[in-house]
Amino acid sequence: MSVQIEGSAPFDGGAMAAKVPGGGHSAGHSPLGGWGKNDPFFLPAGTEAFKRDLSDAQVRSIDTKHFALETHCDEIAEAMRNFLTR
């Protein structure tokens, strides 16, 4: 019997961006991504792949798990404000 563990599949940010109008870019901005460092589903390898496939992306690792907005809302909101007003 074979078991596929969620989150173990290779992450392809380029393929993901190809599905988004503008390639993941909006209003002249490079993409912003946030990852929980301890997220059991979106693994650190996904963060690295996202940065590799979308080289102009800003990626932030947050010291939390999967539900980052529930535990780090203020930190994420500040990062978004800074990103959108630069």
Image: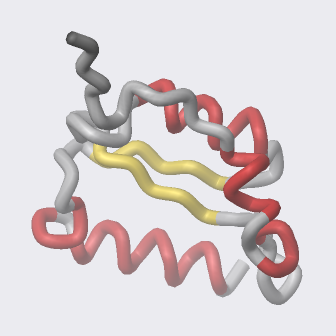
Residue located 13% across and 71% down the image? 70
Image side of residue 70 versus residue 4, left or right = left
Image side of residue 34 versus residue 4, left or right = right
Q: From the viewer's perspective, is residue 75 above or below residue 5?
A: below
Report the quarter where the C terminus lies. bottom right
| Residue extending farthest front | 1
What colour scheme was applied to this rendering of the protein? secondary structure
Residue 36 image point, x, y percent: 30, 46
Q: For residue 52, what is the image quadrant?
A: top right
Residue located 19% across and 46% down the image? 64
For this rendering, which residue is in front, 31 or 5? 5
| Residue extending farthest left | 71
- Total numbered circles: 0
Residue 68 image point, x, y percent: 23, 60
Q: From the viewer's perspective, is residue 46 above or below residue 73?
A: above
Image side of residue 35 versus residue 12, left or right = left
| Residue extending farthest top | 1
Report the quarter where the N terminus lies. top left
Residue 81 image point, x, y percent: 51, 83
Q: For residue 58, what is the image quadrant?
A: bottom right
Residue 40 image point, x, y percent: 21, 35
Q: For residue 34, what is the image quadrant?
A: bottom left
